[in-house]
Amino acid sequence: HLYNTPITVAPDVTQNTALELLYLNYTSITVAPDVTQNTALRLLNLQGTSITVAPDVTQNTALADLYLNDTSITAAPDITQNTALTDLYLNSAPITVAPDVTQNTALELLNLYNTPITVAPDVTQNTNLKYLYLHYSSITAAPDVTQNTALELLHLHSTVITVAPDITQNTALESLYLHDTSITAAPDVTQNTALELLYLYNTPITVAPDVTQNTALVALHLDNCELPSTE
């Protein structure tokens, strides 16, 4: 663990072939370490560093957790070989294209919040996905989440999407954030009986969603929409 130390150069770990965990988060490094020899690596945390190029992780087939958030990387790494990956953090990095996650079938968390991506990632192969964060990105269309039946949380708020995603297959969904978007119709939530949080405020929807089946719902925000007045 070297996190939150003032080191400016990452250590040479090319000889540490048994290395499983590498924490360099919140250090002052500007170049990612070479981890191509660390085939046992399970976690790599470079959060909050000043790296501009993502590390090559194509040899790290055991990698489960990858933190590249709050860095200066402009392109996501190639993770097509990282089939054990469960958690990927790229939020608050200036990447313009979402990573290809179609090979990452074990993925449970994907965080692309506050990135300038304009197209949502293809998550149709990520059937284990539970948490998807795409808020404060530049996506114009919601991702297809019809195959993500394990999905529990979906953040799409503060984007320019105009159509809500089809969530009728996401029966495990507990939290849905669509506020501050341009959707004109609320999503069909009649199949989402586990839903607890539904945020639709600051949208131009004109008809409130049917929540008669959502008996677990604890918070429903419809303020500042274009619903008919009840006065």
Image (tube, rainbow, N blue to C red):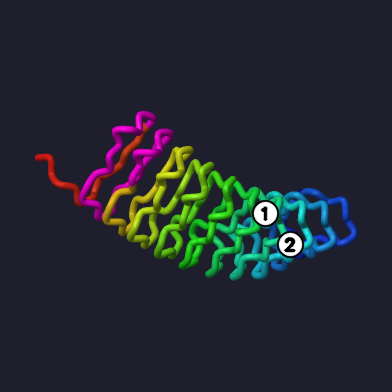
- Please name the residue shown 67% across and 54% down the image: 66
Question: In the depicted view, which residue is nearer to us: 173 or 93?
Answer: 173
- Which numbered dot is residue 13? none
Determine whether, in the image, residue 145 is placed left or right of residue 28.
Answer: left
Residue 124, horizontal then vertical, whole percent: 54, 55
List the residue tagged with mark 2. Answer: 57
Q: Earlier in the sequence, mark 2 or mark 1?
A: 2
- Residue 106, percent across and down? 65, 48
Q: Is residue 94 left or right of residue 31?
A: left
| Label 1 crowd bin: few (<14), some (14–19), many (20+), radius 10 Å | many
Question: Does dot 1 land on a helix, a strand or a loop?
Answer: strand
Whether residue 157 is situated above or below residue 56 in the rendered picture: above
Q: SS class of the residue under badge 2?
A: loop
- Amino acid on which the number 2 mark rests in the picture: Val
Q: Nearer the viewer, residue 151 or 96?
A: 151
Cβ–Cβ below 8 Å for labels 2 and 1?
Answer: yes
**Magenta part of the chain:** 188-216
Looking at the image, residue 172 sits to the left or right of residue 203; the answer is right
The x, y position of residue 24, in whole percent, is 72, 55
Label 2, label 1: how many angstroms apart (C-alpha)?
9 Å
Give the main secondary structure of the magenta stretch: loop
Indicate whether residue 98 is drawn in magenta. Answer: no
Q: Residue at 27% x, 39% y: name it.
A: 210
Answer with the quarter of the image where residue 76 lies.
Answer: bottom right
Give neighbour class at mark 2: few <14, some 14-19, many 20+ (Cα, 10 Å): many
